[in-house]
Image (spheres, rainbow, N blue to C red):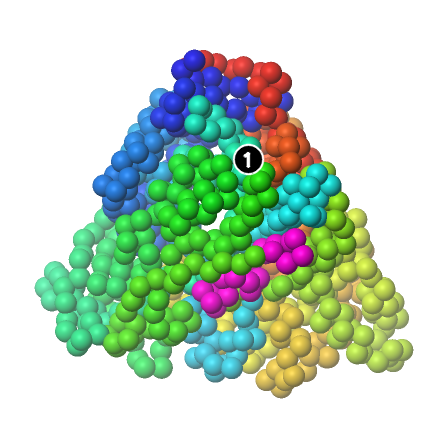
Amino acid sequence: MATETYRDRWGVPHLRADGVLALARAQGRVTARDRAWQLEVERHRAQGTSASFLGATALPWDVLVRRARLADTARRCFDALEGRDQESAAWVRAYTEGVNDALADGARRAPEFGRTGLTPGRWEPWHPLGVWLGAHLLFAGFPAKLWRERVVRHLGPGAVALFATDGPGTSGSNGWLLSGARTASGRALIAGDPHRFVEDPGVYQQIRLACPEFDVVGLAVPGVPGIAHFGHTGTVAWAITNAMADYQDLYVERLRRTGTAVEALGPDGTWRRAARHTETIEVAGGEPLEAEVVETDRGPVITGDPAAPPAAVCAPPTTLSLRHPPRVTADLGFGALLPLLRARRVEDVDRAFDAWAEPVDVVLAADTSGGVLHRVAGRVPLRAEANRVHPVPAWEPGHDWHGEHEPPRAGLTDGIAVMANQRGPSAPLGVEFAPAHRADRIRALLAGRADWSADDMAAIHTDTHLASAAPLLDRLAALDAPDPGLTPEAARLRDRLLRWNRRMDAGSEEAAAFAALRTAVVRRLAAHPVFAPLAEPSAHPEVFLPWLALAPRIGFALENLLRAEELYGIDRPAIVRAALEEVAALPAATWGERHRLAPWRALDGTPHEDPREAPFTEPGLSGDHDCVLCTSAVPGVTDRAARGPVARYVWDLGRRENSRWVVPFGADGVPGAPHHRDQLPLWTAGELVPVVTDWARLEKESDA
């Protein structure tokens, strides 16, 4: 046996090889065959060349990538990996060799190449690191520092806490671990669901990797070898969530030109020459754009014009450099990936995550011997508190980095550990965290039993209780009843919402009415003159706008804004009353009619229809941002859900064959393929697919 490829009934690839490198090549080949378009989109995004075939809509991202020097950072990280861990570097090389072996064949399967005229390129060993870095460059949400700076400038420091919540640009997850004392089998269970923008093809690839050294099932990132985030080796399993740590800094730079050179003012009062060059970004259907790339001693300048005069003291900072660990240390943590595959016990997983760098995550792990692990992994620099909160002046001393935080650790409470981006073990490392609603709800549900099984986990995944509805419903209850100021229709709606079970179920008219009321309140608050300065256009790049838009910020912080003792003189009862009247006049609808899946697609944002496949209809969804079933709408902007569970998993340490998983679409990224969308009905319904590990139950596809 050199390499064998098998498939289960859902088209999930199961790969078997006689060695680690042969297996990596096989993973690259099968990914290129199933996901050629996705791989090439991500490679081009990592290089800042996606506008060359996607057009001007991709230009803002390409400009950021060029100015942030993402590709150069990825190259540096691979070179450093090769210098300190030759085995891991060879393994990454083998993966890219496999991609190159099959990319042309995969491109022939994918209609998007013909639509764009894109020719598949050649993968270099640093490209997987570029894909990884591109996926996580904005993951820690450093643009939130621009929002905080804006709030302080217009409303004062005390206003920052009003908006402190999980913002629209961050990514999160649910995850939970039950020790054997809480399960029917007496062995641990790990389950959860990562929340990101839902993409088609999906951001995770179900896969199995087997060779004499290991046999692992899990969720891989297409374009990256191994199984980084969620895996089960048979004797140990692990999962991660976003730790919500702050590890990226923004520096306000003072720059000046001296001839063709650019100089930056440092904290010692000295002007030093910055690295500078220009790059040409090709744009399909448009003129090429020249991008000036400048890097100071702090990091690459990601926004601002070096030729512009310094901003006035009262003006917002516009020339900003980005400092983040991979650029400083030349390490993305790829040295953790092979050890994870080889892990047999939680101690092995723990040692592997010691090498983890980017992004910073909370890790749960358990093994068949009863071992458990709950820790934070990744690099967070030690620096001044101001660095964590807002952009800091590059010319002032005291904002340098001096070492790293020791990753925090935690344990289980009553046999349970829950991670849902709330303040937990990573609290010392972050500034803003998700509200505790999801974590509290999961823990409350799990605490009610001590005989959980893998089959029971779907009920947790799909819980729709919305605890964050309370402040708005309290405001409704505070309206006088009966209130002669309310129309009969508004009074009836008020009574219905106060009797509502607070579940965001797709078939619920009350859930839809609540969401409409919330949106109406958000829009009225956003239109209030006191917030007008926060709605002014930003001078920062377009890619940062999701963090700077006023309505989403108010929508996600609505609890705080409604509960605050005083809100700048705003008459909140009047706003709620007017919003109630507005919604009472609307025609009835269910939440699922309004709350529909809106996945991201690289090409025109439209489905890639194929005559062999039924036209895509956006399914109606249960859930909401603060539900365990976290299908995120943006209150005040849209009820459609662009973010949600990009996978669900259950890892059973009693018997791996009892494990479950599902993704939003399917295993194959090619429109019209049998396994392109075959999991969508199951994902929508909250059902999971069995993890098959018996080779005799799989269909052999090829030998290679």
Tell me if mark 1 has few (under 14), some (14-19) or many (20+) residues whose alpha carbon lies within 10 angstroms of its own: many
Dominant secondary-structure state across the stretch colored magenta: loop
In the rendered view, does 482 fall on the left or right side of 21? right
Number of dots carrying numbers? 1
Front one among 253 and 351: 351
Residue kind at label 1, given as amino acid type: Thr
Residue 611 location (% of width, % of height): 59, 23
Q: In which quadrant of the rendered image does the C terminus lie?
A: top left
Front one among 208 and 365: 365
Residue 625 location (% of width, % of height): 63, 57
Farthest-out residue, front: 369
The residue indicated by pointer 1 is 235
Which residue does the image show at 54% across and 39% down from the upper left?
236
Residue 332 location (% of width, % of height): 35, 48
User: Within the magenta stretch, is there residue 415?
Assistant: yes
Q: Is residue 61 visible?
A: no
In the rendered view, does 339 fall on the left or right side of 614? left
- Residue extent of the magenta highlight: 412-431
Front one among 313 and 92: 92
User: Within the magenta stretch, is there residue 479?
Assistant: no
Q: In which quadrant of the rendered image does the N terminus lie?
A: top left
Q: Is residue 416 visible?
A: yes
* Helix, strand or loop under label 1: loop
Residue 218 location (% of width, % of height): 53, 35
Farthest-out residue, left: 259
